[in-house]
Image (spheres, rainbow, N blue to C red):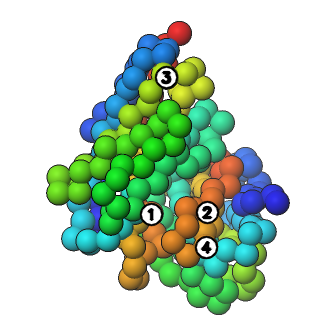
Amino acid sequence: NAGVTQTPKFQVLKTGQSMTLQCAQDMNHEYMSWYRQDPGMGLRLIHYSVGAGITDQGEVPNGYNVSRSTTEDFPLRLLSAAPSQTSVYFCASSRGGGPQHFGDGTRLSIL
Amino acid sequence: AQTVTQSQPEMSVQEAETVTLSCTYDTSENNYYLFWYKQPPSRQMILVIRQEAYKQQNATENRFSVNFQKAAKSFSLKISDSQLGDTAMYFCAFRPYSGAGSYQLTFGKGTKLSVIP
């Protein structure tokens, strides 16, 4: 079992570039989510999905898109990167009311 | 909407001593879950302990225990016999038991704990 796998671990972008952060889980969890972690802010929910084909916005969704075509994958897309999106991004998954399993995070810097 | 407050940005404790991290929350929900997560310098988010609000008994996991006071909306974490490996950021988190927000975790801003040899 790999758990929750995030790629890449580090990325540097220029303002205006686009990219996709990948997240995959092999635990057959129906719930997946993306958080961002900024200094002094804790983790804040960006988008989440309660199953394939179903997504919804969290606390800080602006500038990000998601889709959920399979149970396993939940990519996060930045269409036009901005310096304010410099952060550490975490993907998490869970089954029902169970605890959330987190990936190792992606450190993203936007210049 | 729920809020989670951790009033201690930083704390330190001597190795082998006991330390308590504070967490308060605000919610109109009656049933919910509370969590403590540990984030060491490796950046992984590790679940330390979980408490269901409908259970009166405080959760315990080895050296980690909680003091859950539902009426006061307080959820503190006690670490006994502190070890160097306990050095980390600790986050308190809340999740409703049911409803539209039941999958979403709301986090506090964290407490940075340093264990001193």
Q: Is residue B89 visible?
A: no
- Disc 4 marks which residue? A95
SS for tag 2?
strand
Q: Chain of mark 3?
A: B
- Name, please, the residue furthest toward the left: B71
- Disc 3 marks which residue? B82
Q: Are marks 2 and 1 in contact (CB under 8 Å)?
A: yes
Which of the marked residues, 1 or 3, is nearer the chain's N terminus? Answer: 3
- Disc 2 marks which residue? A92
Vertical order, B109 against B29 (above or below): above
Q: Chain of mark 1?
A: B
Which marked residue is nearer to the observer: mark 4 or mark 1? 4
Q: Are marks 3 and 2 in contact (CB under 8 Å)?
A: no
Residue B74 image point, x, y percent: 25, 49
Structural distance between the alpha carbons of marks 2 and 4:
11 Å
SS for tag 4?
loop
Structural distance between the alpha carbons of marks 3 and 2:
28 Å
Structural distance between the alpha carbons of marks 1 and 3:
27 Å
- Say which amino acid is labelled 1: Leu
- Disc 1 marks which residue? B105
Which marked residue is nearer to the observer: mark 3 or mark 2? 3
Same chain for mark 3 and mark 2? The answer is no
